[in-house]
Image (spheres, rainbow, N blue to C red):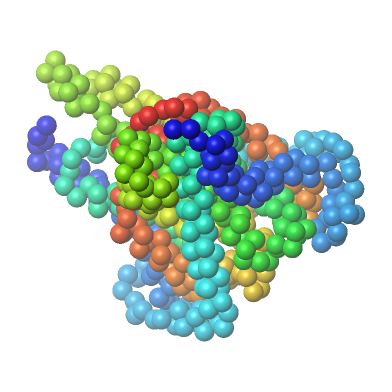
Amino acid sequence: MRRPAATVALHYAALIVLGLVCVTPIAVMFATSLKLQVQIFSTTLDFLFTPTLQNYRDVLGEGSFARYLSNSLIVGVVSTLITLLLGTMAAYGLARFRFRGRTTLAYTTLLLRTVPLAVLAVPVFMLWSRAGLINSLPGLVLLYVAVNLPFTIWLLYGFILQVPVEMEEAAAIDGCGPLQVFWRVVLPLIKPGLAAAAIFTFRIAWNEFILALVLTDRSTRTLPVAASLYITDIGVDWGKIMALGSLIAIPPLIFTFIAARQIITGLTAGAVKG
Amino acid sequence: MRRPPWVPLLYVGPAAVVMAVACLYPVISALQLGFYDWSMGTPWEEARWVGMEAFVASFRDPAVWRSLVTTLMFAAVCVAAEMVLGIALALALEGNLRGMSVFRTLFILPMMIAPIAVGLTWRYLFDAQFGLINALLGLVGHDAVAWLAQENTAFAAIVIADIWQWTPFVFIMMIAGLSNVDTAVLEAARIDGATWWQTTRRVKLPMVMHVIAITLLMRLIDAFRVLEVIYVLTFGGPGDSTEILSLHIYKTAFIGQRLGNAAAISVLLLVVVAALSWAALRLSNPLKEGERA
């Protein structure tokens, strides 16, 4: 259907305005992170200011930053790898086998996907305290894996169903063992799903704040928890907190720009065939 | 091909165990914890069995009811606004425009950023003295508003932040749904002389009803789970005007140190979310038996 040029122009205008609405708050965060206290508290609109890296120097110079960063990276990467491994196996099992308890497992998995994290925080704090997992990175990783598995299984299940069983059978007849069949036939075909699952899992593990706040201490803190420490009773240390917020935002921003297609696949999975 | 019965377990077992230990068991423990009086920092052996006391106390507590009402209002207002905006924008802007993928990339940014950063940014934008929103209001001659210091405007602030973050989700779901509408049907409608509005109302909308329903349920479920943005933006204040259930549970447990009460209130939130999830599953079960897409 051809549309008149005026309509097209109007569409672009609307899209640009919407894009600006989405980007402006994020841009304000970055801009504020480059301002000094005086400029932050200025009440006039100033789009032209002399940027300073002072806030970043302060944040990075605070000694524990390296530890928080490495905690966040370890938790993010390890949770993602374990979730992908276990999630792929489970999705494959659910898609390819009929066994007793399959329906129960499928339903429980989907219901667990929606448990509010605030509801988890209370019992997990108690259980992890008793099990000696509190204030430890493995304790946090275990929780993030469990929280992310339902979505990963759900997403990959759809992708595995699209792989024709006949291809697997042909490979098996040609002498491939189950592992080889999986590695050579299934895995290459579900790569987009794996990418989406990896991004979503890493995003949760990297961004998550409440569970990390409850389950970590001085030495196992992740970056979002560290950022929250700049909010005190006497006010917010805006420059530093925006600098740290911007640093935390970098990996998700990179993922968004290089893998927007996969993210949209992940967002619409289950509801829209596409 | 016959397989020994334990083969499937090899595949699903590890994931099932992790989810059982770190997700299902804690949820069940929350139910159990609701029957105990346990203060943080004391050994579990000192916890006292109090039966239904915590549940009864919670349901008699006006603060819990206020929080429930706040949560329901928050979810209703946010989700209604997001659905209307998202659907309207998708209907108006769908189609193969060159460069649409660039805009879609921009639209998913608010969902990818850490919720704590979203909360902070909006707290800064809504600041009474130096926030951008008051500066913009000033340009049109409006007086500065102490957004986060008054009950109504603070509630508006958390709603606006949520709408900013999640309307793009509805938009993207709808664009994906609309792109699956059979072009032959649209062509037929056009040949029959249907106007844009008739095509939209009688052809497109009915064909994406399923997507709309599932999007609505997903948004509702998530609206009841919101915590981090509000934690940073208002921390429930002023007073308890923005204290949604998740935040109330958090405060009861980790500030009030009444874990049993917190667990009892958790059950309330769990029931609401579980009911919505169940409805979503009935509508579209991605793990349905034997389904071949």
Q: Residue furthest top?
A: B192
Give the answer, above or below, for where B56 lies relative to A26: above
User: Which residue is drawn at the image coordinates 20% and 21% (left, top)?
Assistant: B185
Along the viewing direction, whichever of B5 and A92 lies nearer the viewer: B5
Quadrant (top left, top right, bottom left, bottom right) of the N terminus of chain A: top left
- The quadrant in which the C terminus of chain A is found is top left
Q: Is residue B204 left or right of residue B76?
A: left
Is A108 situated above or below B37? above
Percent x, y of residue B260:
80, 47
Q: Position of residue B76 (x, y in %)?
A: 52, 35
Q: Nearer the viewer, residue A63 or A3?
A: A63
On the question of residue B217 being in view, the answer is: no
Which sits in the foreground, B35 or B226?
A: B35
Against B280, residue A89 (above or below) is below
Seen in the image, is A209 located left or right of residue B88?
A: right
Q: How far across and how far down the image is residue A165, in percent?
A: 35, 35
**Residue drawn at the location 84% of the way across and 36% of the way down:** B52
Q: Could you tell me which residue is drawn at 46 percent across and 72 percent down? A: A243
Quick one: A2 or A265, which is closer to the camera?
A: A265
Q: Looking at the image, which residue is at 52% across and 50% down? A: A86
Query: Residue B28, how many percent across, how many down?
Result: 72, 41
Report which quarter residue A168 is drawn in: top left
User: In this figure, what is the number of numbered marks?
Assistant: 0
| The image quarter in which residue A27 lies | bottom left
Q: Is residue B293 visible?
A: yes
Residue A11 is left or right of residue B151, and the answer is left
